């Protein structure tokens, strides 16, 4: 739903496509920032880097590539470094490998 309300997005898009990932509301403003029009799919990571952009050369209605989106999500998540445990905590940075392998 281009600039739809949360209820419209849920009723028309999420339920109609069985989408399970987060969706952007009021996408028109964000799309303009990236130079996009409607019917495009874009995955932006936590640093604002575009990790996936649908192929605009495809006809409207067939631009969504679920496998490519899922792969881009997996790669983006792997790029996020694991947080360091707080200083002085019982968990030391090197201890997880030993725990997992035991």
Image: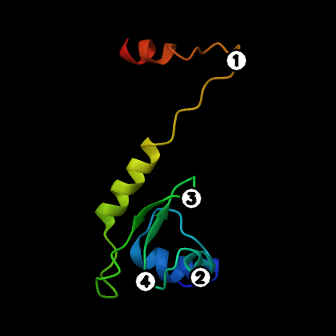
Instruction: Give the image location of residue 89, x and y in percent.
Output: 68, 15
Instruction: Give the image location of residue 61, x and y in percent.
Output: 33, 86
At x 33%, y 55%, the residue is: 71
Q: Secondary structure at mark 1?
A: loop
Which numbered tag is attached to residue 28?
Answer: 2
Q: Which residue is mark 3?
A: 48
At x 63%, y 79%, the residue is: 29
Q: Which residue is mark 1?
A: 87
Q: Who comes first in sequence, dot 2 or dot 4?
A: 2
Q: Which residue is mark 4?
A: 39
Task: Identify whether 50 is placed above or below 89.
Answer: below
Q: CA distance from mark 3 to mark 2?
A: 16 Å
Task: Identify whether 83 is placed above or below 51.
Answer: above
Q: Who comes first in sequence, dot 4 or dot 1?
A: 4
Q: Who comes first in sequence, dot 1 or dot 2?
A: 2
Q: Residues within 10 Å of mark 2 (few under 14, many from 20)?
A: some
Q: On the image, which quarter does residue 99 sit in?
A: top left
At x 42%, y 54%, the residue is: 73
User: Which one is closest to the eye, mark 4 or mark 3?
Assistant: 3
Horizontal side of 57 relative to 42 (left or right) equals: left
Q: Secondary structure at mark 2?
A: helix
Q: Who comes first in sequence, dot 3 or dot 2?
A: 2
Q: On the image, which quarter does residue 62 sit in?
A: bottom left
Q: CA distance from mark 3 to mark 1?
A: 29 Å
Horizontal side of 4 relative to 56 (left or right) equals: right
Task: Identify whether 46 is placed above or below 21.
Answer: above
Q: CA distance from mark 4 to mark 3?
A: 20 Å
User: 90 or 7: which is nearer to us?
Assistant: 90
Tag count: 4
């Amino acid at each position: 739903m281009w600039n739809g309300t949360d209820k419209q997005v849920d009723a028309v898009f999420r339920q109609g496509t069985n989408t399970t990932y987060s969706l952007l509301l009021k996408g028109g403003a964000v799309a303009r920032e990236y130079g996009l029009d409607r019917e495009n799919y874009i995955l932006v990571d936590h640093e604002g880097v575009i990790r996936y952009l649908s192929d605009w050369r495809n006809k409207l209605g067939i631009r969504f590539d679920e496998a490519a989106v899922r792969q881009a999500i997996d790669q983006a998540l792997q790029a996020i470094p694991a947080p360091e445990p707080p200083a002085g905590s019982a968990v030391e940075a090197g201890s997880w490998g030993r725990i997992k392998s035991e």
